[in-house]
Image (cartoon, helix red, strand yellow):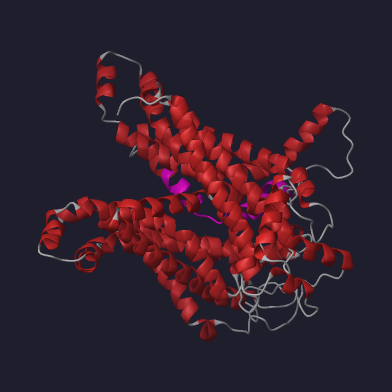
Amino acid sequence: MPPRRRGHRGWRLAGGYLLTLAVLVHLNFLLPRLMPGDPVDALLDAQSPSYVQDGAARAELERYYGLDEPLTTQYGRYLADLARGDLGSSIRYGRPVADLVAERLPWTVLLLGSSMLLAAAVGLALGVHSAWRRGSAADRGLLTLFLTVHNLPVFFVGALAVLVFSVELGWTPLGGTRTPFDDPANLLAAAADVGAHLALPAAVLASGLAASYYLTMRATMVGELGADYLVLGRAKGLSERRLKYRYAGRNSLLVVVTWSALRLEGLVTASVLVEVVFAYQGLGGLIFDAVSFRDYPVMQACFLVLTVLVLTANLLADLACGRLDPRTRA
Amino acid sequence: MRVRADPVVVAGAVLTLALVATAALAPAIAPYDPRALGPPLAPPSGAHLLGTNDIGQDIASQVVWGARSAVTVSLGAALVAVVLGVAVGLGSALVGGAADTVAMRVLDVFLAVPQLPLLVLVAALAGPRQANLVVVIGLLRWPDIARQVRSQARSLRQRGWVSAARGFGGGLGHVARHHLLPALGPVVVTLAVTTVAQTLLVEAGLAFLGLADPTAVSWGLMVNRALRFPGIFFIDAWRWWLLPPGLAISLGVLGFMLLGVGLEPYANPRWRRRSP
């Protein structure tokens, strides 16, 4: 294939993602309106457990959905509100959803980012090692361990982790994002507090992802092992270490980067459950509250924001992959 | 398909059969009505094998009945996903052209969406009835299957016997039914088994968030209730209240996963050619 200009590829990729985003924005509009009954029914019905008592909130809800207006008017207003960053008003908190999301989003990004780094470091290193010594006792042990971890329900792992590390050993706080009512003396103390609260949820979230990284890295690298360039490298007298990481490892990394963008969707799903277990004040915690109170505007906003987050990260990974692989460089 | 007594397959089959049998025989096995109230937070004893929860419901009976919702929802959702995935994958491989392109774009959209937030939204809007959960989870799980079926079907299409059938005037439907589906059988079975492992996890996750059928007993909901109990970790109750449903989910998923891993070699076309 002749080399393409990078700018062209970037735009084409971005176009694909914009199309996906457009579909999802419309899905977000249509879903509540396609469902049997409508979302306000449950909230305005005095018999329903999610009956909204507060008159102002009810009026706000009816205004937000505008269900008495024609669909085209609703559609126009939905897009206009979205463009202005107006995501409606929360039924439970009576506050603009955009504000709630803005408060919670940084914590989720922190949790996702730190667990991704942790998972990549552990999973990739062990994957390379396991493939290099495939068939050994260490390889078989690691493979069994990660295959099991890969399929455990993350909220159960989280609960067990709290039990062991917080309750029995007392190493980490029981949950939450920061110590409540605590006024740290300086920035360092504040960071230490945030870190202590972050450590366990990030580790639990990373365990599942590390398993995916490990399994993919191992599978790719095993396929790479018989390659001619390794035979030649060995004949040239290159060190095992150099062959293992700089040659086979680096070549396998390409596949793993492409693939890891696809895994981000699963990581977001797991993060929602982990945040609930650890009462972590990110978007996942917000979704959980929204489910308990049938707070539809909040659920819809969380869905949109997380979708944009995943799509952006996917686009970045796609672009990074183009740079990592010299063959796609112009 | 002849399956050798591979320990992985055997372990997977034993766990899976145990789960399905428990689900089928729930009324006969469970010692109590899972909703009946009794002494709260009773430790395991002769009367209550796994103790009771905060409102005195028998944990052992709840775990047994939980198998029923887990199996119903996960098998149902996997069935929806497999039927849709095979239909779209086969159709798009056979028809090709613009239809194929459109199907693949739709697939990309589905694969990029963070599924849990979408599931939460749909399940909350539609109401978490079991039938709704089956359809919703199934609708989000078909793209993986469609993609794999499509790539397999495309390579099968190039084989001589398919071209021969087309040359003798066999229509697309005839080719799909008589030539592609039988050849794809083992692949589809393996995909279906791994899909059940996934739908089982998704069902548990949704129930954990509180989106479970209010008329059924669900393992995820049991874990949720246990964790919501203030100070659950500081009393002994977690041993009999939190561990059994958590382990039940883990073992159920593990069973289908092992079965899938064990069946994989039999679904691999290269492997199959050597031992017809």
Residue positioned 88% across, 40% down in the render: A182
| Residue A104 covered by magenta stretch | no
The answer to whether A47 is drawn above or below residue A126 in the figure is below
Magenta region, residue range:
A143-170
Where residue A257 sits: x, y (%)? 46, 34
Split into 4 quadrants, where in the image is the N terminus of chain B? bottom left
Q: Is any atom of residue B11 visible in this view?
A: no
Q: Position of residue A304 (x, y in %)?
A: 64, 50
Tell me residue A223's x, y (percent). 30, 36
Residue extending farthest to the top is A236
Q: Quadrant of residue A78?
A: bottom right
Is A124 on the left-hand or right-hand side of B100? right
* x then y, percent, for residue A189: 82, 30
Q: Residue at x 36, y 40 (%)?
A: A219
Q: Nearer the viewer, residue A167 or A60?
A: A60
Quadrant of the frame with the C terminus of chain B: bottom left
Q: Relative to A55, say whether A264 is above or below.
A: above
| Residue B209 image-quadrant placement | bottom right
